[in-house]
Image (cartoon, rainbow, N blue to C red):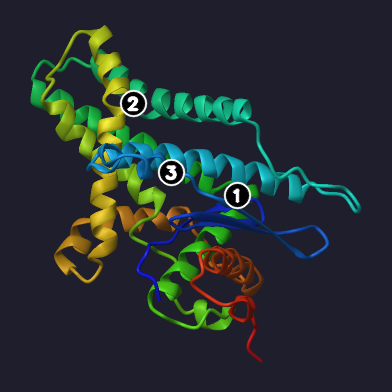
Amino acid sequence: MSNAPIGGQAVLEGVMMRGPSTWALAVRKPDGEIAEVNRPIHSVMARHWLFRLPIVRGIIALGESLAIGFRALAISANYAAQEEGQEVETELSRGAIIFAFAIAIGFAVMLFKVTPALITNWLPIETTGWFVIVEGVIRVSIFILYLLIISLLPDLRRVFEYHAAEHKVINAYEAGEELVPERVQRFSLIHPRCGTAFLLWVMVIAIFVFAFLGKPSLPWLIASRILLLPVIAGLAYELIRFAGRHTENRVLMTFLAPGLWLQRLTTRQPTLDQLEVSIRALKEVLHVEGRITPDERKVEVMA
């Protein structure tokens, strides 16, 4: 079995799985059948060693992951709305990707970066150390409150179930377990490389990075929270990447526990049908990348 890591993302009624050179999407259509789509990955990190340097590779990986995620989400939405006999659009234009990227990043920066900085700036805090700490606490609190609110939305429950299905399948695969729904169901719905944990550590690491800047003037305060985001994301990527390779280290896992606990808000126990979809997405990636044979792609439900 290849040691190359597998990542993923929950989408509407499905799961996207990603390997080093391929990403694949499996979606449960309204008629109950599972649709599969796969696309190659042409990462810019393969073009020059500079793009593979620590932190730099994290910035690039985050951008590429967001682009793939938007494409997968759009395709899954098209399948979810598919009517009988209707063709499904499985491509997203570059303009649409850029627009979605700008909206998502803009919303995240304003809510989780600029807003905490502005709130803290309005408070009567003169000490630099306290300013950075209070800003960090406000930032993390807004993030947790945001997750709590969206976790209460009924329409997102099934997405959270597919999120857990993605985690369980990757955990089972990394453990060398047979990929059948009943066996996969036994695995944890928590995974150290989850994006939820990544976002939390982006906010925690920001506290230490912004500590070097002190309490700047308002224009530089806002500009620094935006301009330094790629660097902070790159550092968080390195931490999550390291954690994913050392899950047996109890000290490290204890340190990262808050990020793992937070995943309880964005995951729900999946059904066997949802696990089947997630397994199909993973096996499609493994097949295209030559890690399994065509016969091994079949997903079986144990009696």
Which amino acid type is shown beneath numbered disc 2?
Lys
Q: Is residue 89 left or right of residue 136?
A: right
Q: Secondary structure at mark 3?
A: loop
Q: Earlier in the sequence, mark 2 or mark 3?
A: 3
Q: Is residue 68 left or right of residue 144?
A: right
The first of marks 3 and 1 along the sequence is: 3
Is residue 138 found left or right of 16 in the rendered image? left
Q: Is 30 drawn above or below residue 226 in the view shown?
A: below
Measured Cα–Cα span from mark 2 to mark 3: 28 Å
Tag 3 residue: 43
Q: The C terminus is located in which quarter? A: bottom right
* Closer to the camera in the image, 7 or 267: 7
Instruction: Give the residue at the far bottom of this rendering.
Output: 303
User: Marks 2 and 1, Cα distance to the nearest angstrom?
Assistant: 25 Å
Picture residue at 57% right of the left edge, 61% below the top? 161
Q: Position of residue 214 (x, y in %)?
A: 12, 19
In the image, which disc is placed on residue 156? 1
Q: Where does the image place residue 44, in percent across and percent down from the top left?
A: 40, 39
Q: Residue under label 2, please give it.
A: 113
Q: Residue at x 83, y 62 (%)?
A: 31
Give the alpha-carbon distance from disc 3 to disc 1, as whole Å. 31 Å
The secondary structure type at the circle numbered 1 is: helix
> Which mark's residue is nearer the viewer, 3 or 1?
3
